[in-house]
Image (spheres, rainbow, N blue to C red):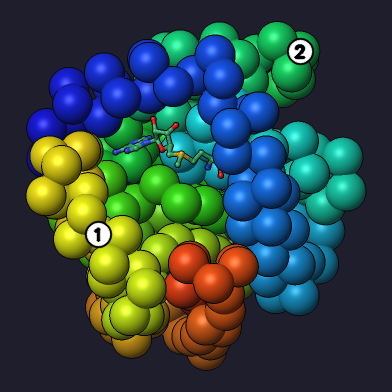
Amino acid sequence: MSGAAVDAEYAALAADYDDDWAVYNRATAERTLRAVRDRAGEPGRALDVGCGTGTLLERLTTTAATVAVGLDRSAEMLTVARRRLPGTPLARGDAAALPFADASFDAAATNSALHYADDPAGCVRELARVTKPGGTVVWTDWDAGALTTRGVIAWLRLTRRPLGRALSATAMAAALTDAGLTDVRVDRWRHGWLWGLATVSGRKPG
Ligand SMILES: C[S@@+](CC[C@H](N)C(=O)[O-])C[C@H]1O[C@@H](n2cnc3c(N)ncnc32)[C@H](O)[C@@H]1O
């Protein structure tokens, strides 16, 4: 899936995104936030990759991290995030090549974004790279091992909507391990009857 197709999708969705996806976004952000807090307490610097309009980023900023930074490849989604969170650092960029130095963050999180990537495991390596030794990586996404989620993925492919490589919860956890993270935990969960999701998390040794 080309980045241009993802950009076109979110340029079209950005203005109404918060209204259209409010319930799903809140549920996934809370689950991701819970994992960040469980694993990292109150991280000094946190990163939200694929932050979109800033639902998780807002929660990180107000309840967990001292400083939270958002990154997304969609200019239009970042425009909405900027209105919502004035003063919060936002960067435009790609999860596959994060524009941050090694070991810049105490926690790096991503929520419902990496299924757009052709190489989500490579993106996870980037999250691990920018995380400090002793820091935490949390990834919430569709669980391609869940039957109903497989149905959504099949429908998206049939209708030629943008989609990269959605992984099963087991493969997500393996990607964290392959990225050098330890104490990897897997939380499979559902949002409504349709969405089978997973929140996986791990610790960078050191
Ligand atoms: C489903 S939205 C989720 C937004 C936000 N994380 C949330 O939970 O509300 C997916 C977001 O991921 C972004 N995205 C997709 N692929 C990306 C990539 N390779 N690098 C950075 N952002 C990406 C899209 O632009 C979009 O804003």
The span from disc 1 to disc 2 (Cα, nearest Å) is 35 Å
- Assign ligand 1 to one image quadrant: top left
Q: Residue at x 52, y 52 (%)?
A: 111
Q: Residue at x 26, y 18 (%)?
A: 8
Of labels 1 and 2, earlier in sequence is: 2
Left or right, residue 198 beside residue 89? left
Q: Is residue 128 above or below residue 58?
A: below
Which mark identifies residue 86? 2
Q: Residue at x 58, y 32 (%)?
A: 20
Give residue 160's position: percent from left, percent from top. 12, 39
Give residue 66's position: percent from left, percent from top. 82, 42
Q: Residues within 10 Å of mark 1 (few under 14, many from 20)?
A: many
Left or right, residue 111 beside residue 92? right
Which of the pair 190/121 is nearer the observer?
190
Left or right, residue 1 beside residue 54? left
Q: Which residue is mark 1?
A: 153
Q: Residue at x 67, y 39 (%)?
A: 22
| Amino acid under disc 1 | Ile
Residue 92 seen? no
Which of the pair 168/97 is nearer the observer?
168
Q: Is residue 84 above or below residue 145?
A: above
| Amino acid under disc 2 | Pro
Q: Are marks 1 and 2 in contact (CB under 8 Å)?
A: no
| SS for callout 2 | loop
Which of the pair 35/43 is nearer the observer?
35
Which mark identifies residue 76? none
Left or right, residue 45 beside residue 7? right
| SS for callout 1 | helix
Give residue 136's position: percent from left, percent from top. 58, 67
Q: Residues within 10 Å of mark 2 (few under 14, many from 20)?
A: few
Name the quarter where the N terminus is drawn.
top left
